[in-house]
Amino acid sequence: MERIPFGVGQLDSIVNGGAPTGSVVLLSGEAGAGAREFMHTSALINGLAEVDDELFDLYYGTPSADAVLPDEVHYISFTASGSQLTEEMRIAMDDDIVDAGTEGVEFHDLSERYFHISPVPREWYAERTDSIKDLRARHERDDLLGALGILLNDVASGNLVVIDSLSDLVSAMGEEINWADISFLVSGLQKAAHEWGGLILLYVNHDTLSDVRHGQLSDAAHGTMSFAWESGGSTRARTLVIKQFRGVLSEIEDENIVQFETEIGDAGFDISDVRKIR
């Protein structure tokens, strides 16, 4: 089975190279527990593979025999521009990785479509003022989820696509977006991803969802990776648990792994320790 690397070397080595092609993976995490950093690391390391072999080898190493690097890397955001995301990535990651890796990542900013249904002043998210023609176009254009679907049809085939984030869609629920739309979106992605043959990462802060809704999203995705804080004595540790994932969870169970301890370093998200069944 061909696999697309997550971009986290130690994790990929354990699961025979990454996620099976055609997968939709829900990255569900507590705030600050590493889900966003995992998403950024995945995009930048896979982007790095396209533009700088030496840096890719330095920060990642040699991909598994079953690994197939994505043709392209696309990062879709509902609230931030590519420049904003790049600066956010610099906070945790080495400038060399960010500078080179972003050259291999195409950012797609859907913030204008996202915010135009809100009372947020237009000058906060758009560079120029409205003309009469612009106002007419805003009312004639497709809705946000329709625009997302058109974009995915154009960029998802054979590629790594990061969607940041489902939490933003939950926050926008109202007249134009309801919960059924979000649930159907993930279910539809699962079906389409099989034909696209790439890898789609969906980020969600699970504190924005009820347990029932979180369960619905988990069932709709091929895999769910849970990022959380764990306290022990006077210390806190970031942890990763793979809740369910076809073609991946079995590899972890064969190694008797129950949990990963993680850290955020100059190369982004990484595995610092592995907890096994004793």
Image (cartoon, rainbow, N blue to C red):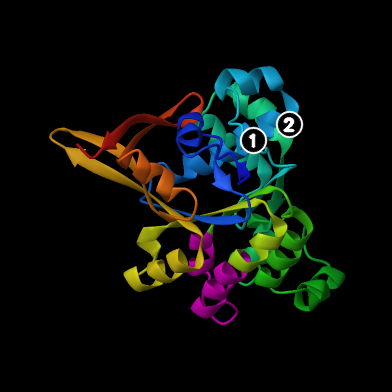
Give the residue at x 55% y 46%.
19
Residue furthest toward the bottom?
Answer: 175
Q: Specify the amino acid type for callout 2.
A: Glu
* Depth order, front residue of 230/271: 271
Residue 47 image position (x, y, % from top left): 68, 35
Q: Residue at x 50, y 68 (%)?
A: 220
- Residue 122 makes an appearance in the image: no
**Direction from residue 208 to residue 95 in the image, left or right:** right
Q: Nearer the viewer, residue 269 or 141?
A: 269
Q: Quarter of the image holding residue 64?
A: top right
Report crowding for label 1: few under 14, some 14 to 19, many 20 or more residues within 10 A (C-alpha).
many
Establish if 81 lies above or below 60.
below
| Identity of the residue drawn at 61% across and 40% down | 43
User: What residue would you read off at disc 2?
Assistant: 50
Q: Position of residue 27 (x, y in %)?
A: 46, 52
Location of mark 1 (residue): 46
Number of labels in the image equals: 2
Q: Specify the segment rendered in magenta.
A: 166-189
Task: Please name the amino acid that badge 1 sits on.
Answer: Asn
For this orientation, the residue located farthest to the left is 233
Q: Nearer the viewer, residue 83 or 132?
A: 83
Let me know if residue 40 is in the magenta part: no
Q: What predominant SS class does the magenta segment belong to? A: helix
Task: Please say if 126 is above or below 169.
Answer: above
Quadrant for the C terminus in the image: top left
Numbered disc 2: secondary structure: helix
Q: Are marks 1 and 2 in contact (CB under 8 Å)?
A: yes
